[in-house]
Image (tube, helix red, strand yellow):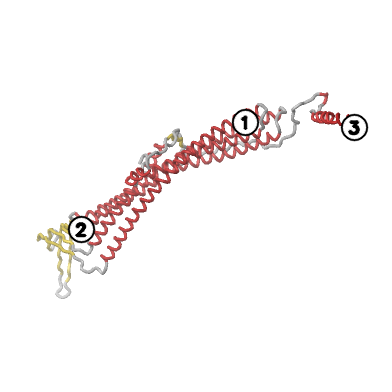
Amino acid sequence: MSGIRAWGAPLFGLLMVLLALPAWGEGGDSAPGRTPPLPIRTAPPPTPSKVTLPSLSEGPLTLTQEDSVRIALERQPDLRIPEADLRAARGRTTRARSGLFPSVELQGTWLAQDSLSAGGQAAEAQTAMDLEQLLYDFGRTPSEVAAARAREGVAQADLASARADAATRVRQAFHGLVAARELAQVALSNLENQTRNLALARARWESGLGLPADVVRASSAVATATVNLNAARAREINQGVALARLLGQDPRLRLEPICEELPAGDQGDLEVLLQEALPRRPEMQAVLHQIEAARQALRAAQANQAPALSARAGVAGRGRELPPESWSTRYGLTLRWPLVDSGQTSGLVEEAQAALDRALARHDVVCQEVAGEIVTSRVSLEAALDSLSAAQAARSDALESVRIAEGRYGAGLGSFLEVLDAQSALLTASNQLAAARLAAWEARASFDRAIGRVPGT
């Protein structure tokens, strides 16, 4: 019994070795390491779609960020609205200022009368030309002129604000197109990598060194990469159309953005930035003009019931024919004093005082809004720049991981799944890098808008 136990273990091991030996084929030849030729049912690799816009006769427009802002401020139709508002405000100022200057009036009358009692007809022609000049109205008209000028300043500030907003949107859309093109290039590179993987997996399977599952995985990865590329190309075209819209260009025009630099950070003191930004922001300029307009309107309302003194001088003609036979000169003073207006003046004063209170409250709101925008935009910029640095490091590591995985698989030391995982991580890192770069540029544009330093405006 002891001898049987002594030989049992070696015999069992020998049996396991014999069972592990490769099968012998016909003619006594062996095929060590060769995969049986199993059929693989995979769909043919799809072809990426050619998503294009209708072509124009003119070629693509190559432009930088500064070019985009300049073209948009020159051609964007949306800016015509605040420009028209500014012209209307200037017209109201001119109309209000006319009350300070003399006015000239020409009148002509020809009147015929028939007598009902005695019969007969009499005719008379009258002609007059008068010049009238306001002398004094207790500051009502000058206050109305000053209020109109302040409202013109509001319209001017609103136009500056609209231009700053337009420039910010253009900058963000420009870098959105840059990011969309980068994402499309990433998707194209991923499709090329997956196509090479499919060819390599199929070649290894046909040589007996690979697995059928590797071919199926590679084919599925090619299909997924094609879908991603189609979506990326569509996003690129849509982003180009959106930018062309902001530029006032034909949406079919192909745009070629040029942007190689990275957004810069800001190391300025926050309190200094706030004090510098307040007078630069057009919203603050607009609210200051609103306060001045409200104060002047209040003065005009308080003088609404005050007397107004004006002088008039002119010539007049009278006779039976035109031109009249007799002429005379006339001159004098006119005093207008509305003694009872049934509450009109008090209503105007109350309304003007409420408008002034609203403008003062709006001033405090704008100050808080500007401060909040500066703080939040600066925090967003710093976070975006940090994320951009991290995304750059992540993509660099992903590239190294792909290199190692492909080397191991080529040497027969790693699995095909390891290669797919590494390339999937690279795709994710590349997309994150493009998104981080876009987020950094958008944060920079928002920060410039917050501190009132929008390039090109």
Q: Earlier in the sequence, mark 2 or mark 3?
A: 3
Percent coordinates x, y for residue 88 in the rendering: 31, 52
Distance in Å between CA atoms under marks 2 and 1: 86 Å
Residue 176 seen in the figure: no
Quick one: SS at disc 1? Answer: helix
As drawn, the residue found furthest toward the front would be 2
At x 15%, y 71%, the residue is 120
Residue under label 3: 1
Distance in Å between CA atoms under marks 2 and 3: 132 Å
Amino acid type for the residue under numbered disc 1: Ala
- Please report contact status of discs 2 and 3: CB closer than 8 Å, yes or no: no
Badge 1 density bin: few <14, some 14–19, many ≥20, Cα 10 Å: many
Amino acid type for the residue under numbered disc 2: Gly
- Please report contact status of discs 2 and 1: CB closer than 8 Å, yes or no: no
Q: In this view, does 85 lie above or below 216?
A: below
Q: Earlier in the sequence, mark 1 or mark 3?
A: 3
Residue under label 1: 405
Percent coordinates x, y for residue 312 in the rendering: 14, 59
Q: Nearer the viewer, mark 2 or mark 3?
A: 3
Amino acid type for the residue under numbered disc 3: Met
Give the label on residue 139, or none.
Answer: 2
Camera-side residue of 75 and 418: 418
As drawn, the residue found furthest toward the bottom would be 117
Camera-side residue of 290 and 264: 264
At x 71%, y 27%, the residue is 207
Badge 3 density bin: few <14, some 14–19, many ≥20, Cα 10 Å: few
